[in-house]
Amino acid sequence: MLPRRVALNCLARTCCVNAAVTARGMQQIGLAFVLTPAFRCLYPQKEDRARAFARYGGHSNTHVFMVPLYVGIVLSLEMQIARGILPEASAGALRETLATTLSALGDSFFSGALLPLWALVSVFLLLAGQTRLTAVLTAVFLALLLLFRILTFFAGLRHGMSVLLRLKRLNLINWVDRLKIVNAVMAALVVWQLPFRHLKPFPWLLCGLATASVLGAAWLVGRMHLPRILLWALVLGLLILMDAGLIGM
């Protein structure tokens, strides 16, 4: 096991992993920065340390919230390599597969469901005038996220690849669908809080057309596999034309 000081140093550095992102290597430089304290401890000889860094010299990218877990598992593998339990070649194949898997999970759960939920709830509370409650919610969210990063880092460091089985039991992928349903409800509540709900008479036709548009867009994306970026571009273009007075409502 790594000394606690070294492990905490690596954990703290995971917050800076995206500070030097490049188009070619993505998190390559940041990952080397994170692993440096551990490699200095595990590989006192310069030759061994150089080979260790070379194993992570290629393209590297995973979701930023999953970086601590990724680094913890990588360090667990490197400790076994340093003790001669695993061959050096095993790290390269596992590294790429692990990064891709955690990236997909992070994109789906955090970026695709949890962060939008926090944003929608915050907007709803702000529109309702609940500024302090929004600040408290944000602080709680950040604290839980920090706790998740710490726990997953030490779980990966202690249990290695087997921690992925425990992560699978959390069933985060199925929670994505449930959270997206909640997000749809929150989006409707946010729209209801907008000023036009006070208009007299209430614009039922406009609301009906907006609801039908959202449902139609969901059908086009889900069934017809139409790129979401294309729908976004069409809506943005329509709003620009309306703002310029070329299209009237």
Image: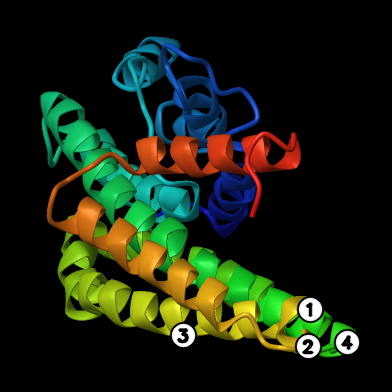
Marks 4 and 2 close (CB-CB < 8 Å): no
| Residue 121 in view here | yes
Marks 3 and 4 close (CB-CB < 8 Å): no
Residue 132 disc label:
4
Marks 1 and 3 close (CB-CB < 8 Å): no
In the depicted structure, whether residue 185 falls above or below residue 37: below
Marks 1 and 4 close (CB-CB < 8 Å): no
Disc 3 crowd rating (10 Å Cα; few below 14, some 14-19, many 20+) is few
In the depicted structure, whether residue 110 falls above or below residue 192: above
Residue 185 disc label:
3
Left or right of 121, for residue 175: left
- Kind of residue at badge 1: Pro
Q: Distance of mark 2 from mark 3, alpha carbons?
A: 20 Å
Marks 2 and 3 close (CB-CB < 8 Å): no
Which residue sits at x=53%, y=81%? 188
Which residue matches tag 2?
A: 198
Q: Position of residue 141 (x, y in %)?
A: 63, 76
Marks 1 and 2 close (CB-CB < 8 Å): yes
- Image depth: mark 2 or mark 3 in front: 2
Which residue matches tag 1?
A: 195
Left or right of 197, for residue 26: left
- Image depth: mark 1 or mark 4 in front: 1
Q: Position of residue 64 (x, y in %)?
A: 49, 47
